[in-house]
Amino acid sequence: MSTDRPLIGVLALQGDVREHVAALTAAGAATTSVRRPDELSRVDGLVLPGGESTTISRLLATFDLLEPLRARIADGLPVYGSCAGMILLAEKIIDGRPDQHQVGGIDMVVRRNAFGRQVDSFEADLDVTGLDDGPVHAVFIRAPWVESVSAEAEVLARVPDTQAAGEAGGRIVAVRQGRVLATAFHPELTGDHRVHRLFTDLVREA
């Protein structure tokens, strides 16, 4: 691995792949798309993008990536998941489908589609542990939230407990466990690359 420009793959089966590629490039990483096991085997880190978690999980199985990805995460591969990616990284999900596969990596319970239907997007300014220069403007689109985490996982951000946040107030929306990072929101959509820089630094340190 080049410590200056680690090679970070973006799972390119479904979801907002191009936006993550652009954000990772801005954060100083070399990037590649991952659709096959041999491509997965070459990357120093991996992003699981937003999209539809059930569809992505089925495609992981179809493209023979599910077990190799689980194995690489277990071996210490740094992984970042946003929105649907957060759902995939959870050990347990609420309101999931019976045919949905988990890759695991963070000992947390995630509620799928907690923020509501696609039309019910939500935005908030979050204080994120590990990020300087002020709050992150977070965009949630049909997003999950984290119901609970084990002692192994670190909570990095919660939705501010305001009247506007409603039931989402106080909910966990960013978590890290070792080399695995997850957010319920979409930093790849806002032009703020701090989360991607945080992940790129995590990959460099691995």
Image (cartoon, helix red, strand yellow):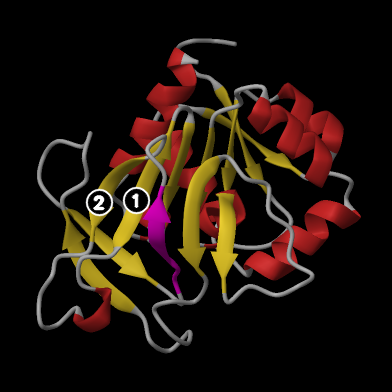
Left or right of residue 157: residue 202: right
The range drawn in magenta is 143-149
> Going 48% across and 10% down the picture, which residue do you hit?
3
Q: Residue at x 37, y 45 (%)?
A: 175
Per the image, is 146 magenta?
yes
Relative to 178, residue 18 above or below: below
Quick check: 174 left or right of 14?
left
Q: Position of residue 135 (x, y in %)?
A: 14, 51
Which residue is identified by label 1? 174
Q: Residue at x 89, y 46 (%)?
A: 64
Q: Which residue is mark 2?
A: 157
Give left or right: position of 36 versus 1.
right
* Relative image position of residue 71 (x, y in whole percent): 75, 31
Amino acid at circle 1: Ala
Q: Quadrant of residue 33?
A: top right
Percent x, y for residue 84?
A: 56, 62
Tell me which label, 1 or 2, sits earlier in the chain: 2
Counting from the top left corner in percent of width and height, residue 194 is at: 29, 40
| Front in this rendered view, residue 202 or 154 | 154
Is residue 121 among the parts visible in the rendering?
Answer: yes
Q: Residue at the location (73% across, 38% down)?
A: 70
Secondary structure type for disc 1: strand
Viewer can see residue 16: no
Would residue 36 be counted in the magenta stretch? no
> Dot 2 surroundings within 10 Å: few (below 14), some, or many (20 or more)?
many
Quadrant in which residue 120 is drawn: bottom left
Q: Amino acid at mark 2?
A: Ala
